[in-house]
Amino acid sequence: MITTARTLTITWIALIVATVAAFVLCEMGTDVGRWAIWAAMLIAALKAGVVLHVFMELHEGTIAWKLAFGVWLSFCTVLIAGLYYFTT
């Protein structure tokens, strides 16, 4: 199944909305505190998953590829979150 232009456009708009949401959340300052950073990390991980699935057409790949990229994305997310947690 080839990804349609409509799907790509809707996905792109959703990614822009998620980017703006993460930016606004982090710019709220001390009202939200450290939770804003964790929420922004979660949003970034979800965005990366969407890019892998839709734009890189991972949904067309085999289970092995999906698993490999899922593990890679999870590892990178946990690594970055861990480094942030232990260095702040």
Image (spheres, helix red, strand yellow):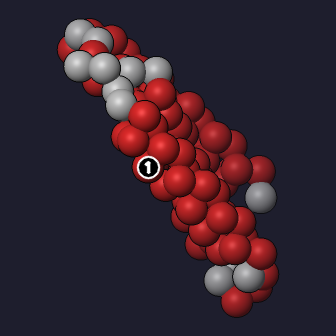
**Image quarter (top left, top right, bottom left or bottom right) of the N terminus:** top left
Residue 1's place in the image compared with 37, above or below, is above
Residue 37 visible in the current orientation: yes
Residue 65 appears at what percent x and percent y? 33, 12
> Camera-side residue: 12 or 30?
12
Residue at figure coordinates x 21%, y 14% from the top left:
63
On screen, 24 above or below 37? below
Residue displayed at 60% across by 68% down:
21
At label 1, counting other C-alpha atoms closer than 10 Å, the crowd grade (few under 14, some 14-19, many 20 or more) is few
Between 71 and 26, which is closer to the camera in this rendering? Answer: 26
Residue 50 seen anywhere in this rendered image of the structure: no
Residue at numbered disc 1 = 10
Q: Position of residue 52 (x, y in %)?
A: 45, 28
Q: Residue at x 39, y 41 (%)?
A: 6
The residue nearer to you, when weighing 81 against 8, is 8
Q: How many marks do you count on the picture?
A: 1
Helix or strand or loop: what does disc 1 sit on?
helix
Q: In this rendering, would 49 be left or right of 27?
A: left
Residue at 70% across, 50% down: 84
Q: Residue 79: give x, y in percent of width and height.
A: 59, 36
Which one is nearer the viewer's eye here, 19 or 84?
A: 19
Q: Is residue 57 above or below residue 77?
A: above
**Which image quadrant: the C terminus?**
bottom right
**In this picture, residue 27 sits left or right of residue 68:** right
Q: Is residue 34 above or below residue 5?
A: below
Residue 49's spot in the image, x, y percent? 44, 37
Residue 28 occupies quadrant: bottom right
